[in-house]
Image (cartoon, rainbow, N blue to C red):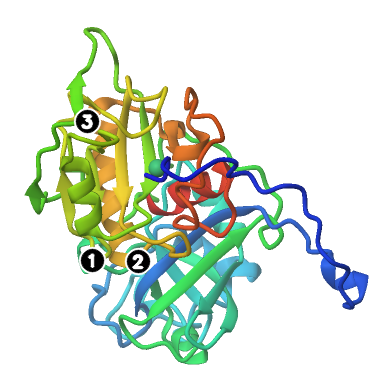
Amino acid sequence: MAPKRKPPKKKPAAKRPPRKRPAKQKIQPVEEILFRVEGKMSTFGGPTDTGMSATEGLALFTPADLQEPKYSYLFLPTPPPGTTGLGRRLNPEQNYFACRWNYNDTPREFLRRSLARVENPANGRTADARPVDWGPNVTTGRVADLSPGLAKALALQTDDIVRITISALRATPVKPVKRARPAKGTVPVTQPAAPTKPVIKQFVRSPNCSCRKVGTKIDKIVLHCTEGSLAGALAEFQKTDSRKVSAHYVIDRNGDIYQMVNDSDCANHCMGANAGSIGIEHVGSETDSLAPPQAAASGALIRWLLQEHQIPRTNIFGHDFTPGYCRPGGTSCPDKLFGPVHSQATIAAWVAANV
Ligand SMILES: [Zn+2]
């Protein structure tokens, strides 16, 4: 949303009063974030994890890695009795973790060489850890599984919020290589299923829409921040007497998805770019970031939309950065929902981590 506010939205060049801090502290290296996720966690791996079968392997490592000095420390010297898989052979005291990787964005070989920063946002503790597996299953509502030792070091308990970042500064500088298909034998145990449309809590029809022109392909997704409450957004999009705005979907902080316009129709959410786009509003204020269930719901909806309409992954934009968007003065939308910096790079990093 947000076009109602007056331009200019772009902040003028910084004209701050001089600070007394040493100049050194003002210089911050630019951290290129290659992967980031934040949400609930649990623990996995090691001899006592009976949630893994005795034969279960790991998506990123094979038995050959047991002979590789830079990886062998992740594993116990001998397999626990009765087990043959690498999952139970993980050393639970070492720092490792699993996330639902998209191997197009973060290929296996890249992940194997990466060191991630894992953080407990509640107490600020951080630790370095290695990605070892794909998971947890999306139905758990969690975004990551950590080694028991890592969880303990960060004082995290099951279903606490964790933040995981892989940045160019911390990753071994290898160029991610796109692979058409994974190498034989390294297919993750839990392959993501083809996306289905997430449950729509309610279809609250908006009159502020029109038929798409014949032959117009849906080719982009535009992400918005409501800058107000769910009730406010639903009411605004049903009004016929004012700005006549709308969006296809509105996602509440708790992850509930409301649909207001059929995908096959144009909604009025992004001036100049409505013809071929789907608009998704996320309930939040100007200073909010996405709530974890909201991020999960948005990721699931976007995954389905990408497949349903064959939209390229690169065509997911923040409102202000949408090609064709032409409102004079721009907009501050989607604010800080997807990251602290108002940029398309922030959106792309969020997409890489959550979609
Ligand atoms: Zn917007």
- Residue at image location 23% in from the left, 82% down from the top: 50
For label 3, the residue is 308
Query: What amino acid is labelled 1 in the image?
Result: Asn
Give how far across and how far down residue 111 sits, in percent: 54, 56
Identify whether 194 is placed above or below 42: above
Which of 60/241 is in front?
241
- On residue 151, the disc is none
Q: Nearer the viewer, mark 3 or mark 2?
A: 2
Q: How many marks?
A: 3
Residue, far top: 214
Query: What amino acid is labelled 2 in the image?
Result: Ala
Identify whether 179 is placed above or below 99: above
Please say if the residues under marks 2 and 1 sit with CB atoms less than 8 Å apart.
yes
For label 2, the residue is 291
Going from N to C along the chain, the mark reached first, 3 or 2, is 2
* Ligand 1 closer than 8 Å to label 2 CB: no
Going from N to C along the chain, the mark reached first, 2 or 1, is 1
Circle 3 crowding by C-alpha within 10 Å: few under 14, some 14–19, many from 20: few
